[in-house]
Amino acid sequence: MLTQPASVSAPGHQWETVHLIPDKPSGSDYAYVVRDKAYACTRQGLLDSIATLGAQVTLVWTPNSNEPVRPEQMEFLVAEFQKRTQKQAKRAILLGSGLVAACIIVALALNQWKTGFRNLVFLFGAITLFEGLWEFYRTRSFTMLDAQADAGAERFAEWLKKKSVSGYTVAVVAAIIIVGFAQVLAGDKESIEAAGLVKSAVWQGQIWRLSTATLMHVNFMHFWMNFLGLLYLAKTIEQTIRRCFVPIVFFLSGICGSLLSLLLYPHTTSVGASGGILGLLGFLTIEVWLARERYPINYLRRLLEGIVFTGVLGLIGFSFIDNGAHLGGLLGGVGLGWYFLRSRKNSQKGLRWLSLTTVVLLFFGVLIAASKMLKL
């Protein structure tokens, strides 16, 4: 027999809703629910299920609870959530350390330290290592609130995975992919010279480079890391704010990043969608700050940690990362968030037209970039 949920969903939190609650298995004091199916178990079995499955366990029964409750609300299960977080942190530390060590070995073997450290594999390893160390440090004093925050964040992430993206995000991703194909055909170095943020060319009047550079990448690893960040942030904004904000924030924040890069590093060349992506992060951070009750517990802290880790990454790779574009994009997103989200009285029709305009401008940039790279 299945019944509709009553008090097991947080108001307004779709990812916390349990759509079907099975009956408690007979003959057992302890039981848990995974994917709407109930499993009888012992106390130790319940502890093991939390350590293994974490927030995938949506409800539990104990001798002290006649009705099913969230596992993170049971005091004796908090330690298992702590162990699970520690295990994940150790895994991140191991992965990050391995990648950093591999880069050091390559640098020693080839006697080329720039090759060993000036690459995205080293940066990915370093940031993964720092994140793992931070998470492990955080678990030293782990409370029920921490367990609830981790469980909420895990369910939120699983809920997002099941969501598809709208045409707005597809348009942004398509623009980046098309330009990426043009780069492959033209060659990395040639394409960057043709449509990247070559500062001397911008100072001479080629202002279209402020936009085209935000659709380009140095290599596949650069593209893939930005793609994953873009997809997560765009999905979150689409599902919790409005879909039409994705192209608006990405395009305008990318321009802001290019402008600040131009001012701070007037004699360098750079490419990448990071400015637009940091803009999405800044925009989402303002939204969560203004309406944090609509998001998982401590979600604002997690976003701020993401900003800090991005800053750390920029410091580690300062010699080849455009921190000006990162900072400019972030500030652009924060400004747009403050402008659009503070009053919540934006015209839906006006936003739709603005988003369509930015999509058109994005693809105008695609045409310019492709024509310059391929010399059409």
Image (cartoon, rainbow, N blue to C red):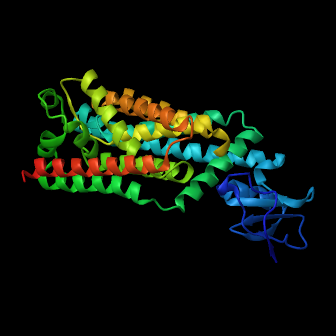
Specify whether 231 is left or right of 345.
left
- Frontmost residue, 100 versus 210: 210
Residue 122 visible (yes or no): no
Residue 153 visible (yes or no): yes
Picture layout, residue 372 above or below residue 209: below
Specify whether 310 is left or right of 89.
left
- Frontmost residue, 41 versus 314: 314
Q: Quadrant of the C terminus?
A: bottom left
Counting from the top left corner in percent of width and height, residue 95 is at: 47, 45
> Most extreme residue toward the left, as rendered?
375
Q: How many marks?
A: 0
Q: Quadrant of the N terminus?
A: bottom right
Residue at figure coordinates x 89%, y 68% from the top left: 28
Picture layout, residue 361 above or below residue 35: above
Specify whether 313 is left or right of 31.
left
> Most extreme residue toward the bottom, as rendered?
1
Counting from the top left corner in percent of width and height, residue 270 is at: 23, 35
Picture layout, residue 58 above or below residue 245: below
Tell me the quarter of the picture where residue 61 sits.
Answer: bottom right
- Frontmost residue, 44 versus 308: 308
Tell me the quarter of the picture where residue 335 sits.
Answer: top left
Residue at figure coordinates x 53%, y 38% from the top left: 341
Counting from the top left corner in percent of width and height, residue 132 is at: 54, 39
Counting from the top left corner in percent of width and height, residue 256 is at: 33, 32
Picture layout, residue 37 above or below residue 324: below
Residue at figure coordinates x 21%, y 56% from the top left: 181
Residue at figure coordinates x 65%, y 56% from the top left: 15
